[in-house]
Amino acid sequence: MLQEKAGNVAGTIWNALAGSEGLTFKQIKKATKLSEKDFNLGLGWLLREDKVNVAETQDEKDPYIYSLK
């Protein structure tokens, strides 16, 4: 059950990133309405599958930007 949810949330994040060159957590959250817990679940799935890049930003409050590989 949790694996299915992780896959669905990963798909939601993937769709948000598909039309962009990269988004921060706050931007993804706004676009998808995901909770932080669900975001982390889906992001973990995408990272494990080696589907996203993560880069650091200069913003201390939103320190990472995510993009599709």
Image (spheres, grey):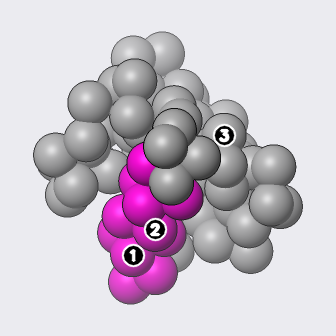
Local crowd size for mark 1, using a 10 Å CA cut-off: few (<14), some (14–19), many (≥20): some
Which residue does the numbered mark 1 point to in the structure image?
Answer: 15
Which span is picked out in magenta? Answer: 5-19
**What residue is at 83 percent from the left and 61 percent from the top?**
50
Numbered tag placed on residue 44 in the rendering: 3
* Circles 1 and 3: CB atoms closer than 8 Å: no
Numbered tag placed on residue 11 in the rendering: 2
Quadrant for residue 53, please give it.
Answer: bottom right
Q: Is residue 6 visible?
A: no
**What residue is at 66 percent from the left and 40 percent from the top?**
44
The amino acid type found where label 1 is placed reads Asn
- Residue 19 lies, in percent from the top left, at 38, 83
- Residue projecting furthest to the top: 60
Q: Is mark 3 on a helix, strand or loop?
A: helix
Q: Can residue 36 be seen in this view?
A: yes
- Residue 47 lies, in percent from the top left, at 75, 49
Dominant SS of magenta comes to helix
* Circles 1 and 2: CB atoms closer than 8 Å: yes
- Residue 55 lies, in percent from the top left, at 70, 45
The amino acid type found where label 2 is placed reads Gly
The amino acid type found where label 3 is placed reads Gly
